[in-house]
Image: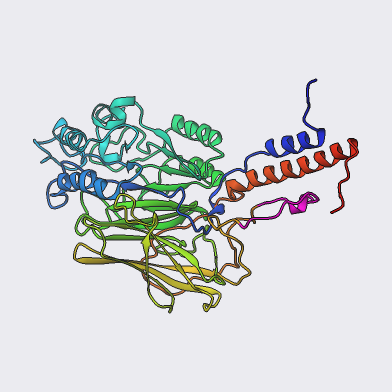
């Protein structure tokens, strides 16, 4: 006789199994105890290989440093180079001694290619985009398509890829903002390509379930202050709908700001023409995005506080994706990254006026290949509001501090992702409300607070991904439904067979 699953139990499985996945956005970033899924990448721009005159005498040296020592120490998931790969000053003269923006020359592009090849950069790890200096006097970006890693391999000026972790998938899309040609000896006119805008729109729709989305190009959406980027409004509209972050170079400055009221933008200084803030690291920690830059002049040690995020953007404005930390915990988790040439001798955390706490490796024993540090702090004595939080790393005979302004709220505090799950008693007469389920793991929230007057480097943006929740929640709900269904089915069978449900004893 063929046995069928009881109809009431089958219904429970179908309802839970067919629930649609929540759409991703950065408003779901959450405070978490574990370090699951954390990853980081490097962002560089404006290497200007071949630059001469007063600016850029160390362009080759800086790119070699970034793709060799920095990659070795940071161990990023990938490296994003957002253009001006060469200086575009090689058309007149020999070996890059020509007039800036005069045009393209193999004498500048070949050294660029030689550097990334010698560093072992490969597809799937190193993504280089074109900048205006890469297309001066070169209609169709033919030099970029011949000498860049991505362009030569794919014959495309745009790319898309994903990073997958234990906490979900994250999408990245690189665009060409040069319109494939700049007139020589001019700075006109950056523009996105219609074909790539269409590709971006299609890709965003296909990746609607990504936890976070990042888009990069060489130019700022509003240009460089004198020449707005063409068709930027079409790109803006897509970024707003999908709540994407935007990264760029071009301006040779290190800034974090809001574009068009809602798009969080980060830019890095010139790798070839600046000495500081020209190697940036973007970190994703439980869907909070933090962006901070070090420099080729004094790169290490380098500290990044990743949990909690700052309520303020680094330069000006309020972080739209900040979450509040419930202060009424005796073991509130804090997390940071530490990068140095030699292992740190000390990683210390300071929360408001509380005593300094020494952070420990996230894996329990020091693993220099996984530079994530954690500490738990009793924050019950704090008042709700804004408080300074900082991490200090001591290594290589120097120290580096990253300070932010965190937002704290009153309890009661919800359980955090990574908290131990309390066992429950699923007795024979348990009802649906007694089924074992995880507590709501969503982040603690609090009313927005005005930014304070702290002027320390705020280090980046923390973000939220609405509706993400803990993936264990769905599994535990299903387990609870199955347990309840089996108990009820057992009771029905016992009654049918005439067995007492409450035997004497």
Side (left or right) of 237 relative to 101: right
Write the residue at 49% across / 70% down.
451
200 vs 264: above or below: above
- Magenta range is 422-437
The image quadrant of residue 150 is: top left
Residue sitting at the far front: 505
The image quadrant of residue 464 is: bottom right
Side (left or right) of 368 relative to 235: left
Display colour scheme: rainbow
User: Residue 45, percent across and down?
Assistant: 29, 46
User: Residue 177, percent across and down?
Assistant: 38, 39
Task: Examine the rendering and report whether any part of residue 308 can be seen.
Answer: yes
In this view, the residue in front, 58 or 219, is: 58
Write the residue at 37% across / 62% down.
360
Q: Is residue 405 magenta?
A: no
The image quadrant of residue 16 is: top right
- Locate the C terminus and report the quarter of the image it occupies: bottom right
Write the residue at 29% across / 30% down.
141
Question: For the stretch drawn in magenta, what is the main secondary structure?
Answer: loop
User: Residue 493, percent across and down?
Assistant: 85, 36
In this view, the residue in front, 131 or 489, is: 489
């Amino acid at each position: 006789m063929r046995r069928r699953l009881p109809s009431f139990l089958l219904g429970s499985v179908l309802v839970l199994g067919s629930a649609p996945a929540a759409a991703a956005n950065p408003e779901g970033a959450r405070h978490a105890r574990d370090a699951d899924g954390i990853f980081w990448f490097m962002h560089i721009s404006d290497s200007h290989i071949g630059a001469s005159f007063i600016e850029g005498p160390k362009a080759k040296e800086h790119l070699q440093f970034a793709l060799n020592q920095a990659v070795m120490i940071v161990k990023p998931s990938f490296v994003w180079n957002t253009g001006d790969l060469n200086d575009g000053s090689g058309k007149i003269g020999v070996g890059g001694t020509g007039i800036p923006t005069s045009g393209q020359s193999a004498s500048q592009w070949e050294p660029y290619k030689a550097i990334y090849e010698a560093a072992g950069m490969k597809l799937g790890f190193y993504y280089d985009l074109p900048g205006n200096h890469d297309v001066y006097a070169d209609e169709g970006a033919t030099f970029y398509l011949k000498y860049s890693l991505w362009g030569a391999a794919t014959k495309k000026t745009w790319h898309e890829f994903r990073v997958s972790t234990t906490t979900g998938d994250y999408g990245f899309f690189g665009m060409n903002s040069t319109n494939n040609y700049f007139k020589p000896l001019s700075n006109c006119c950056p523009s996105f390509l219609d074909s790539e805008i269409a590709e971006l729109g299609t890709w965003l729709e296909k990746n609607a379930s990504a936890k976070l989305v990042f888009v990069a190009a060489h130019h700022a959406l509003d240009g460089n202050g004198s020449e707005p980027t063409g068709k930027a409004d079409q790109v803006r509209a897509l970024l707003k709908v999908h709540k994407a972050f935007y990264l760029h170079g071009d301006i040779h400055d290190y800034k974090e700001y809001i574009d068009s009221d809602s798009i969080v933008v980060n830019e890095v200084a010139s790798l070839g023409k600046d000495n500081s803030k020209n190697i940036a690291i973007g970190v994703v920690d439980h869907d909070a995005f933090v962006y901070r830059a070090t420099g080729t002049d004094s790169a290490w040690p380098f500290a990044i506080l990743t949990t909690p995020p700052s309520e303020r953007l680094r330069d000006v404005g309020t972080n739209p994706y900040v979450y509040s930390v419930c202060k009424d915990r005796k073991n509130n988790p804090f997390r940071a990254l530490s990068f140095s040439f030699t292992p740190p001798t000390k990683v210390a955390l300071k929360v408001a006026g509380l005593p300094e706490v020494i952070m420990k490796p996230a894996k329990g024993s020091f693993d220099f290949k996984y530079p994530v540090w954690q500490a738990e702090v009793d924050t019950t004595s704090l008042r709700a509001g804004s408080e300074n939080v900082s991490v200090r790393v001591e290594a290589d005979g120097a120290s580096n501090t990253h300070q932010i302004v965190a937002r704290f709220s009153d309890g009661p505090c919800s359980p955090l992702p990574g908290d131990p799950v309390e066992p429950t008693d699923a007795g024979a007469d348990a009802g649906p409300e007694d089924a074992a389920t995880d507590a709501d793991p969503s982040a603690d929230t609090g009313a927005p607070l005005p930014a304070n007057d702290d002027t320390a480097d705020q280090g980046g943006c923390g973000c939220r991904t609405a509706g993400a929740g803990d993936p264990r929640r769905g599994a535990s709900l299903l387990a609870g439904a199955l347990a309840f269904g089996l108990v009820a089915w057992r009771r029905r069978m016992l009654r049918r067979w005439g067995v007492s449900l409450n035997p004497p004893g």
